[in-house]
Image: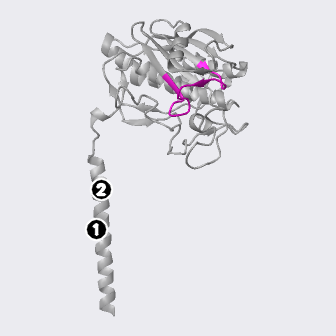
Amino acid sequence: MAFVCAKAVLLAAVMLASAAQLCMGARRRMELYRPDPANMLSYHNGAVLHGDISVSVLWYGDFKPAQKAVILDFLLSLTAEPQAASPSVAQWWSTIDQQYLSPASAKSNGASEKTRVLLADQLSDGECSMGKSLTLEQITALAATASPKKGGVAVVFTAQDVTVEGFGMGRCSLHGSDASSGTTHIWVGNPETQCPGACAWPFHQPAYGPQDAPLVAPNGDVGADAMVMNFASMLAGAATNPFGDGYYQGSSDAPLEAATACPGVFGKGAYPGYAGDLRVDQATGASYNCNGAHGRKYLLPALYDPSKSACGTLV
């Protein structure tokens, strides 16, 4: 009996040693693994936006003054002086400038320059002159009416009762460009009533997956706070890959960009269905990861760090 037990113990020891060797071998292989640079987000030697980026805004449909204020304060926060308390919206934008815009500008112009985002003007089309069901071509036409300056961005914000082609079906926002005029445009829709599960998470339960309780929106408006998140993502893409030959990963027809390369990541420890370890406002219970102008708080997407080949977060 003792001989049998000894054999069992020896067998168990051998199995544990083998398992340990397999784990060490797998870990070693992971340490040796180096992704193909061609498959990673990188610079493709094209133009980026730099210097003073003027933003022309078109409000399409009915927006409450409070909703406009949430979004405009975000714009102001990007390069506001003095900066808000850390972590701030300005730090988020500075990351884009330092990791993307300045290096590209230095490579093409021989010198880097600080990039600022400036609100140029605003227009309102509260009567919805093109109707309340828009195609992507109409979005482009609306952006043109905002008359963006060369090197600038026209932003079309659509109200919650305005439908846009593909909205909520794989698309919450987009950016495009007109290379001939040197301008770019962004569209962002209010998803609160049309597609909150697809475009307002984590401030709404997701359309699919675990149905955990949604987070509290930091400015008390699910639609406006979601619009800021999506706008930030598109602004990062428009600045770093305005004409399709800047910074991106994958196909130029469907690229992953500075923010879209980190989907669903807002804080450290994020994983699918969990936004990450965020800050919580003790007074309101709202979740956020950065501070903005006029005491605002926002939740902004993580940014891909090309030097580390990883997503970087503010918190």
State left or right for residue 38 relative to residue 210.
Answer: left
Q: Where 246 falls versus 287 (above or below)?
A: above
The chief SS type of the magenta part is loop
Q: Which residue is mark 2?
A: 26
Decide which of tag 1 and tag 2 comes sooner along the chain.
1
Please state the horizontal and vertical placement of residue 179, each as a whole percent of the image.
39, 11
In the image, the segment drawn in magenta is 157-174
- Mark 1 is surrounded, within 10 Å at the Cα level, by few (under 14), some (14 to 19) or many (20 or more) other residues, namely few
> Residue drawn at (33%, 76%), measured in percent from left and top?
12
**Residue 73 at x, y percent in the picture:** 63, 19
Which amino acid type corresponds to the residue marked 2 in the rendered image? Ala
Q: Nearer the viewer, residue 13 or 66?
A: 66
Mark 1: amino acid: Ser
Circle 2 — which element? helix
Q: Is residue 209 above or below residue 56?
A: below
Whether residue 82 can be seen here:
no
Q: Position of residue 184 (x, y in %)?
A: 46, 14
- Quarter residue 280 falls in: top right
Q: Quadrant of residue 193?
A: top right
Q: Dot 2: few (<14), some (14–19), or many (≥20) neighbours within 10 Å?
A: few
Q: Is residue 310 magenta?
A: no
Res 283 label: none
Nearer to me, 133 or 53: 133
Tags 1 and 2 touching, CB below 8 Å: no
Between the C-alphas of marks 1 and 2, the distance is 12 Å
Report the disc number at residue 18.
1
Pick the residue in front: 124 or 116.
Answer: 124
